[in-house]
Every structure is written in C-alpha cells, then in structure tokens.
Amino acid sequence: MKSLKSFLVLFVCLLFSNEVLPQESLSIGGYLGGGVISGNTASTGSFASSLFVEVDPGLYKDLSFRLTFLYDTDFNSILPNTTKRYYPFIKGFGLKGITSQSIEPNFFIEEGLGLIALNDRTISGTDEWDYGGNFSLAVGFDLRNLDNKGFKISLGTEYGLTFNNTLASYFSVHLQAQYFIF
C-alpha cells in the first residue's frame, strides 16, 4: 500500500509540473450514475461516483492519461429512511489511457483502458485491496466550440475487474462532466 501512495504522489506532482512534463491539456471531472458491485458476494445494485484528473502530455496524438478515484456503494445508502447498519462499497484508484475521436465538431466518442486498485468492502469485516484492469466507453457533446478551455459532457459506461483476493468488480452507467483548464 505504501508503494501505491508513493506512485500516486509522484504522478500528481508530474501532472502539475510544466517544467518536467509539458502538457498539451489538463482537465478535471467526475461522474455520477448507477451500476453493480461485487466481491466475494452476490452482485449488489450500486450508486457509482468518480473524480478524476486527466492530462495530455503530448506523447501521442489523441492519447491522454486519467488518474481516477472511484467510490461505488449500495444504492440503498443514498435513499432516505433506510435502516441497514452496513452498506457494501468499493473504493479505489485507477490509471487509464484515454483516446477520443470527434464525430462532428461538437460530438465525440471516448475510450479508456487501464489499471485499477480497489478496496473491497462488500462484506462487513472485509478490507482487501485487489488489483486488475478497467475499460470505459463514452459518447458526448463538446461545449468548448474549438477552444482549449471549457466543458465536455457525456454518457458513459465503465467496467472494472480485479484478479486477486476477493475478485472485486464494478460496472457503471453514468453521466460524466469534464472541465478543461488549458
């Protein structure tokens, strides 16, 4: 776990340092939606949320890297008047390569493929870190009007699967917003 924290700190430092890594663009965003989570349990309907920072270092055309924090919890936890004592959840970090293609000047398709580290809390008393991969797909509308700054909104889906310990996984369908700083 200590090496994961060190890696994340180093990556964030690189994101915000123009001298070390001259970025083509930098953006922040997030999504909210619904989906399914599972670990060593049956699948549970979930509320899916995520925050991310994305940077295009200019290494390849239309390839950027996204550092993500995600939190998926039992959908009942956000409903009023629920009386359960424990709600299963999964939280974690991901690093994805993102490509985007313009369909028309304002419409786009976005694909992502990467690695994830998930903290499985789907059963009370379970606290396991699992590692695996994820894939995302989104279609949306670019509100920037050919400018570098502004918003993109999209409808997307994401699937993550781990390969050790409790085999935690998640699937979400979500509405995503992204703001380009430069």
Image: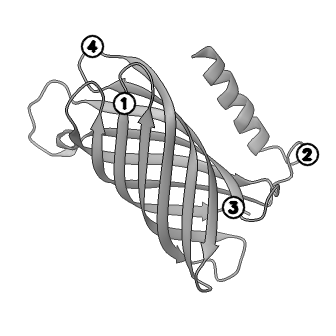
Is 134 placed left or right of 182 in the picture?
A: left
Amino acid at circle 1? Ala
- In the picture as drawn, the residue positioned furthest to the bottom comes out as 104
> Residue 150 occupies which quadrant of the picture?
bottom right
Q: Nearer the viewer, mark 1 or mark 3?
A: 1
- In the picture as drawn, the residue positioned furthest to the front comes out as 163
Quadrant (top left/top right/bottom left/bottom right) for the C terminus:
bottom right
Q: Nearer the viewer, mark 1 or mark 2?
A: 1
Label 2 residue SS = loop
Q: Earlier in the sequence, mark 2 or mark 4?
A: 2
Label 4 residue SS = loop
Tell me the residue that label 4 is attached to. 125
Amino acid at circle 3? Ile
Tell me the residue that label 3 is attached to. 181
Q: Nearer the viewer, mark 4 or mark 3?
A: 4
Q: Position of residue 163 (x, y in %)?
A: 45, 28
